[in-house]
Amino acid sequence: MKHIDDFRAGQGWFLDKDNKTGPLTMAFKRGKVVASPRHFHRSTHEYYLVLQGHATLEVNETEIPLGTNALVIVEPGEAHRLSAASDDFEVILIMERYAPDDKVILAEA
């Protein structure tokens, strides 16, 4: 068992960080630091659950405005990145267990 009294007290990959237990990896991210490079995953789904604030999730060529209570599932092979987050933005990111060489960073245009 892993127990976290207040997952909002910190941020980052906090569940199954060592990839030794459980089928999922989970993160809590907040504020503008959530911006990520454009990338895709070969076999992994990503679930973005917005707790508060707003940001933009770019998926392929589409910009999706995210707000409180939004849920987006990014499929394997879909190029994506999170950007333009508000200071109060908070998101839980859930994905399958880490797989080596699954994440592919794309060059910026």
Image (cartoon, rainbow, N blue to C red):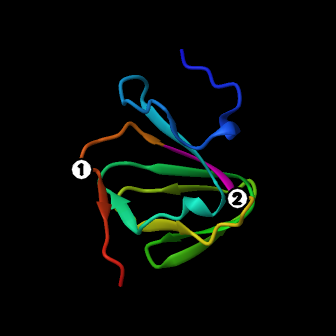
- In this orientation, which residue lies closer to the viewer: 52 or 45? 52
The alpha-carbon separation of the residues under discs 2 and 1 comes to: 29 Å
Q: Of all residues shown, which one is farthest toward the left?
A: 101
- The picture places residue 57, in percent across and down from the top left corner, at 56, 67
The local secondary structure at tag 1 comes to loop
Instruction: Give the prevailing secondary structure in the magenta stretch.
Output: strand
Q: Is residue 96 above or below residue 3?
A: below
At horizontal 45% and vertical 34% (from top left) the residue drawn is 24
Q: Of all residues shown, which one is farthest toward the top?
A: 1
- The picture places residue 13, in percent across and down from the top left corner, at 49, 40
Q: Is residue 79 magenta?
A: no
Label 2 environment density (alpha carbons within 10 Å; few <14, some 14–19, many ≥20) = many
Amino acid on which disc 1 is placed: Asp
In the rendered image, which quarter is residue 17 located in? top left
Q: Is residue 90 magenta?
A: yes
Q: Is residue 99 above or below residue 79?
A: above
Q: Label 1 belongs to which residue?
A: 101
Question: Is label 2 or label 1 in front?
Answer: 2
What span is colored magenta in the figure? 89-94
Q: Label 2 belongs to which residue?
A: 89
Q: Name which of mark 2 and mark 1 comes first in the sequence.
A: 2
Q: Is residue 22 above or below residue 28?
A: above
At horizontal 69% and vertical 38% (from top left) the residue drawn is 9
